[in-house]
């Protein structure tokens, strides 16, 4: 008996050492396996109030961003770029939205002259460019002034994905092992690995690695020490299962794939909402929405439409985007699941062609950049700083002025449009006289000008329906103010008055008159405006602080120069354009460009540009010429609208309104368990049934999608 205790201790020590050795082997394998990564990739989903629009309408949307690795709302994503591409896949507009806890919402105004056709909204981030093309939603637009296109698709919201740029190919693996899932219990986490005599001879004495993963995200790894047996069992912790399709891959010590097995996680993080009750009071329907007990700080977006609506597709939802593009089909017919997994070869991997061995090129983008150059006669600026202040953005920040007189503010949360001011501070923090030129590089992110891989469109079944647009009009009622039309008419009247005021000036017949539009030119620097005037070129010499303006037409003067004679209120400025630096186009009443220089004598041989201040600007010149320089944003974060506003489209019949209109759009509904969320839905006469299309998630990544059809009685 005395000898048993040392033997017992020895057995424990051997087992502990063996376990430690296996753990070290697993750690070494996972750290060196180039297929797997720990990058926080983003998944995107766009929920719009409907999926077909008339030109001139607003696209109301809610955008969701998911952390692919944690399967929770992305907490690191702050800048979300929304890009609009036309039917030729060319970018036509770009906006920036601020993401808070994985979600943002807003509206996207369609111009009234937008042509009919298919358009594409792309959600993207600078970080996402390391991995794939942005998330693309297809919408249809109908121009009411162009009745040629009458047939549209009522199932038009499709998702497009760019195939990831890697060399992975679906590899047929000669399997020495067969992996099977033990289905004696629901959503079993027990997997059997069966080999042959050939497999035993090849791998006996070696450690193999059973890896649980999904599309490059490693969730768990278990070692298999191969001996004389043909059957091995591994039980994973089911809490490590990822949403939707998972994969078990068996690797050898050289990172070669021996076997693969795909399986479905039947406990994916999905919940459904319930409507406890409804109460109708006059023209309003009150719906009491109930969340499951496990929901924590949930957020929803809800589209409210008539049951008959033809401008919506339910094919695209948050489950298809964040779990699997075929989720709805799988859920509807689980008998086809096994065949689906067999055909889903995209989950097969090959360690010989690693999928994730590249370094990330693009950084996380947080806030915007505001950079520029100091324009000042002060020669010594060592130790000087630039101060930026914005009351409406609640910002006061100071940055150092570099030796080349440039400055840069990073990670700014500036709304657009909004105002801010800049000031030059000396070593004693006293404000100095100065001007500033702002560069046009506000983002790290740059969108692609043309969408790539247009062939990779996932088309769904298309149901054609006629849209009789001859009975649908823009709102032109006399008692309704069309603000855009009023602004245009106001500008035309104003422009005519200003042109009449200057029509008799010297050399008027040789002069082009430019009256800045206060709406279109809002926030535009005067030099940026002049750069776009035909015949002018703005140049920034590298060794000076002042821009120069050249005439690009005709021959040089007798001095060999094509430098334009720039005047301010008729007073020549020569080559010193300091007084113009920092001024906005909207500070001027009119800009007169005489490229021929006729009537100006020798000083006008290269042309004359005369900028005339507005009277209001001159009256306020004392403030403007102060040491603090006031600016307006050129770009920044879009302001999120507080409330949904109905479209300006007029439907002549109730049936048209049901078919093509939106009843309501609720982009940001918060839900909690044990507390009903009350929805207040306006109901028009003649609406028997309405449908609610709901998408959302909670802070733990539980996904929510429901389609309710509700009687209004």
Image (spheres, rainbow, N blue to C red):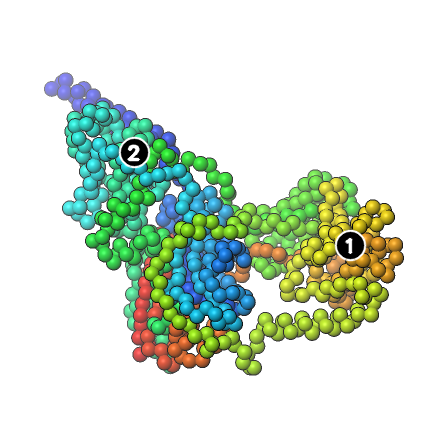
Quadrant where the N terminus sits is top left
- What mark, if any, has residue 98 been given in the picture? none
Is residue 674 visible to us here? no
Please state the horizontal and vertical placement of residue 349, each as a whole percent of the image: 32, 38
Tell me what residue is drawn at x 79 percent, y 69 percent.
Answer: 502
Q: Nearer the viewer, residue 273 or 535?
A: 535
Q: Nearer the viewer, residue 534 or 528?
A: 534
- What mark, if any, has residue 579 been given in the picture? 1
Badge 1 marks a residue whose secondary structure is helix
- How busy is the neighbourhood of tag 2: few (under 14 within 10 Å), some, or many (20 plus)? many
Q: Residue furthest right?
A: 601
Left or right for 665, reference 535: left
Tell me what residue is drawn at x 67 percent, y 65 percent.
Answer: 517
Q: Residue furthest front?
A: 148
Left or right for 624, reference 444: right
Quadrant where the C terminus sits is bottom left
Q: Distance from label 1 to label 2 (Cα)?
A: 70 Å
- How busy is the neighbourhood of tag 1: few (under 14 within 10 Å), some, or many (20 plus)? few
Quick check: 543 above or below 572? above
Residue at numbered disc 2: 257
């Amino acid at each position: 008996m005395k000898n048993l205790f040392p033997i017992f201790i020895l057995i424990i020590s051997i087992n502990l050492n063996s376990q430690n050795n296996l753990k070290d082997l697993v750690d070494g394998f996972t750290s060196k396996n180039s297929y797997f990564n720990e990058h926080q990739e983003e998944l995107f989903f766009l929920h719009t109030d409907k999926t077909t629009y008339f030109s001139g309408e607003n696209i109301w949307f809610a955008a969701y961003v998911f952390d692919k690795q944690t399967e929770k709302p992305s907490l690191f994503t702050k800048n979300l770029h929304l890009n609009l591409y036309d039917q030729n896949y060319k970018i036509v507009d770009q906006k920036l939205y601020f993401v808070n806890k994985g979600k943002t919402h807003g509206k996207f105004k369609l111009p009234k002259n937008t042509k009919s056709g298919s358009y594409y909204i792309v959600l993207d981030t600078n970080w996402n460019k390391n991995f794939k093309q942005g998330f693309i939603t297809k919408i249809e637009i109908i121009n009411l002034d162009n009745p040629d296109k009458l047939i549209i698709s009522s199932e038009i919201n499709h998702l497009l994905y760019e195939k990831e740029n890697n060399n992975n190919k679906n590899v047929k693996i000669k399997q020495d092992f067969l992996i099977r899932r033990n289905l004696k219990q629901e959503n079993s986490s027990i997997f059997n690995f069966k080999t042959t005599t050939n497999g035993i001879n090849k791998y006996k004495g070696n450690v193999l690695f059973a890896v649980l993963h999904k599309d490059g995200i490693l969730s768990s790894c278990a070692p298999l020490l191969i001996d004389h047996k043909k059957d091995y069992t591994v039980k994973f912790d089911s809490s490590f299962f990822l949403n939707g399709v998972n994969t078990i891959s068996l690797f050898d010590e050289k990172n070669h794939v021996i076997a693969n097995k795909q399986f479905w996680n039947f406990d994916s993080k999905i919940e459904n909402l319930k409507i406890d009750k409804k109460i109708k009071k006059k023209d309003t329907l009150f719906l009491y929405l109930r969340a499951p007990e496990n929901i924590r700080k949930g957020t929803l977006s809800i589209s409210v439409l008539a049951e008959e609506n033809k401008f919506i597709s339910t094919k695209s939802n948050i489950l298809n985007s964040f779990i699997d593009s075929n989720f709805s089909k799988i859920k509807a017919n689980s008998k086809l699941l096994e065949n689906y997994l067999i055909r889903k070869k995209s989950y097969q991997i090959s360690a010989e062609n690693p999928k994730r061995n590249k370094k990330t090129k693009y950084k996380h983008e947080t806030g915007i950049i505001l950079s520029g150059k100091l324009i000042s006669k002060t020669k010594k600026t060592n130790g000087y700083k630039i101060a930026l202040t914005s009351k409406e953005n609640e910002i006061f920040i100071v940055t150092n002025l570099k030796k080349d007189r440039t400055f840069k503010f990073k990670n700014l949360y500036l709304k657009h449009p909004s105002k801010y001011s800049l000031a030059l501070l000396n070593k004693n923090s006293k404000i100095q006289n100065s001007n500033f030129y702002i560069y046009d590089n506000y983002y790290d992110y740059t969108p692609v000008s043309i969408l790539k891989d247009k062939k990779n469109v996932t088309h769904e079944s298309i149901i054609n329906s006629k849209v009789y647009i001859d009975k649908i009009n823009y709102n032109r009622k006399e008692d309704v103010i069309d603000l855009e039309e009023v602004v245009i008419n106001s500008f035309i009247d104003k422009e005519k008055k200003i042109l009449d005021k200057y029509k008799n000036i010297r050399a008027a017949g040789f002069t082009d008159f430019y009256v800045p539009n206060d709406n279109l030119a809002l926030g535009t620097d005067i030099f940026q405006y002049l750069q776009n005037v035909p015949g002018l070129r703005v140049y920034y010499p590298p060794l000076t602080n002042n821009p120069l303006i050249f005439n690009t037409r005709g021959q040089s003067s007798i001095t060999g120069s094509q430098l334009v004679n720039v005047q301010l209120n008729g007073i020549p400025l020569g080559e010193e354009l300091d007084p113009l630096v920092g001024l906005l186009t909207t500070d001027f009443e009119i800009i007169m460009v005489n490229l021929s220089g006729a009537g100006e004598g020798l000083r006008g041989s290269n042309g004359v540009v005369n900028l005339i201040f507005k009277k209001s600007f001159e009256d306020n010149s004392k403030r403007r010429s102060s040491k603090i320089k006031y600016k307006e944003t050129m770009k920044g974060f879009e302001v999120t609208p507080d409330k949904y506003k109905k479209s300006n489209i007029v439907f002549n019949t109730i049936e048209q309104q049901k078919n093509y209109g939106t009843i309501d759009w609720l982009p940001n509904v918060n839900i909690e368990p044990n507390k009903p969320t009350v929805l207040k839905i306006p109901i028009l006469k003649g609406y028997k049934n309405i449908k609610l299309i709901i998408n959302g998630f909670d802070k733990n990544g539980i996904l929510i999608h429901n389609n309710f059809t509700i009687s209004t009685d």
